[in-house]
Image (cartoon, rainbow, N blue to C red):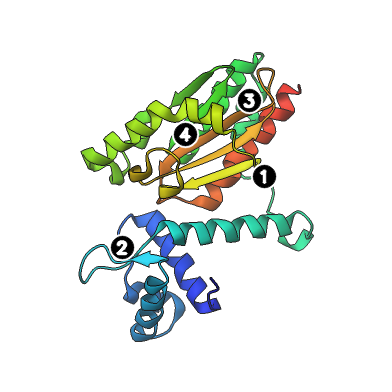
């Protein structure tokens, strides 16, 4: 489904603002951002809602992204990243602090399992999400307390849904073996724990344990996808480079 440039700009602004403030985004805020009338923004928001990219959680409230909205956003980020690999003008700036933290943490370890654990712990610190990785036949998880401090998990039912997902995550990773180097499962796309409203972002890498090792994070659907995707991707890349199988 195609969007006009203005609709795409408004959708992305809602996603990015919501990631920062964790409250529905209203037309007044967006009107100031784009220097147009609130009526214009409301008309575009109504169209985005009709297409299923945003939703209004409460009457008279602002809008929040839906899983479909996040998927459109993530696909756009992925396409931009692919173009950046062949277009110097689109390449990222020098390695961000987070990537440097990962490099230092991983390269300072002398054992493969310590390196993987160090990368996971760094992702927890850098993203505020739960971090995970496969180490042989085991699943290493860190940052559960970080995850549950997010405002989304004040609801006990959502906490239970996340717990169900975690209980089934290891066998799912082993059986499903996601095929892409970077895999993003958003909300209802998760094959387990569909009602938990979380996103799983994982990178595949080769390790001494397996050619199909995984590292990633699990967090609320409301997050900074561009930053988290870049960090998870770099974690997989640096582990593969340091562990050199």
Separation of marks 2 and 1 at Cα, in angstroms: 32 Å
Q: Are marks 2 and 3 in contact (CB under 8 Å)?
A: no
Q: Label 4: which residue?
A: 125
In the displayed structure, 236 sits above or below 109; it is below
Other-residue count near label 4 (Cα within 10 Å), few / some / many at <14 / 14–19 / ≥20: some
Secondary structure of residue under mark 2: loop
Residue at image x 68%, y 32%?
238
Separation of marks 1 and 3 at Cα, in angstroms: 16 Å
Q: What residue occupies the far top of the structure in this picture?
A: 111
Q: Label 3: which residue?
A: 106
Other-residue count near label 1 (Cα within 10 Å), few / some / many at <14 / 14–19 / ≥20: few
Secondary structure of residue under mark 3: helix
Q: Position of residue 14 (x, y in %)?
A: 41, 65
Question: For this view, does 117 lie left or right of residue 95?
Answer: left
Q: Which picture quadrant has residue 219? A: top left
Q: Are marks 2 and 1 in contact (CB under 8 Å)?
A: no
2 vs 1, front mark: 2
Residue 186 seen anywhere in this rendered image of the structure: yes
Separation of marks 4 and 3 at Cα, in angstroms: 14 Å
Separation of marks 2 and 4 at Cα, in angstroms: 26 Å
2 vs 3, front mark: 2
Tag shown at residue 95:
1
């Amino acid at each position: 489904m195609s969007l006009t440039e203005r609709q795409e700009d408004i959708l992305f602004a809602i996603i990015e603002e919501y990631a920062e403030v964790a409250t529905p985004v209203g037309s007044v805020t967006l009107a100031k951002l784009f220097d147009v009338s609130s009526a214009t923004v409301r008309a575009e928001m109504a169209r985005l809602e009709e297409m299923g990219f945003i939703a209004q959680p409460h009457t008279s409230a602002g809008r929040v992204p839906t899983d479909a909205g996040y998927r459109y956003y993530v696909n756009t980020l992925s396409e931009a990243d692919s173009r950046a690999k062949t277009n110097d003008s689109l390449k990222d700036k020098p390695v961000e602090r987070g990537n440097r933290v990962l490099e230092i943490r991983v390269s300072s370890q002398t054992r493969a399992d310590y390196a993987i654990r160090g990368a996971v712990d760094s992702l927890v610190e850098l993203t505020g999400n739960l971090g995970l990785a496969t180490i042989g036949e085991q699943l290493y998880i860190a940052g559960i307390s970080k995850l549950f401090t997010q405002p989304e998990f004040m609801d006990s039912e959502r906490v239970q849904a996340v717990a169900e997902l975690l209980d089934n995550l290891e066998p799912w990773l082993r059986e499903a073996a996601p095929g892409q180097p970077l895999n993003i499962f958003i909300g209802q796309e998760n094959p387990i724990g569909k009602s938990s409203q979380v996103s799983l972002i994982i990178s595949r890498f080769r390790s001494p344990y397996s050619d199909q090792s995984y590292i990633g994070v699990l967090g609320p659907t409301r997050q900074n996808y561009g930053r988290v995707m870049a960090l998870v991707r770099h974690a997989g890349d640096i582990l593969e480079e340091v562990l050199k199988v």
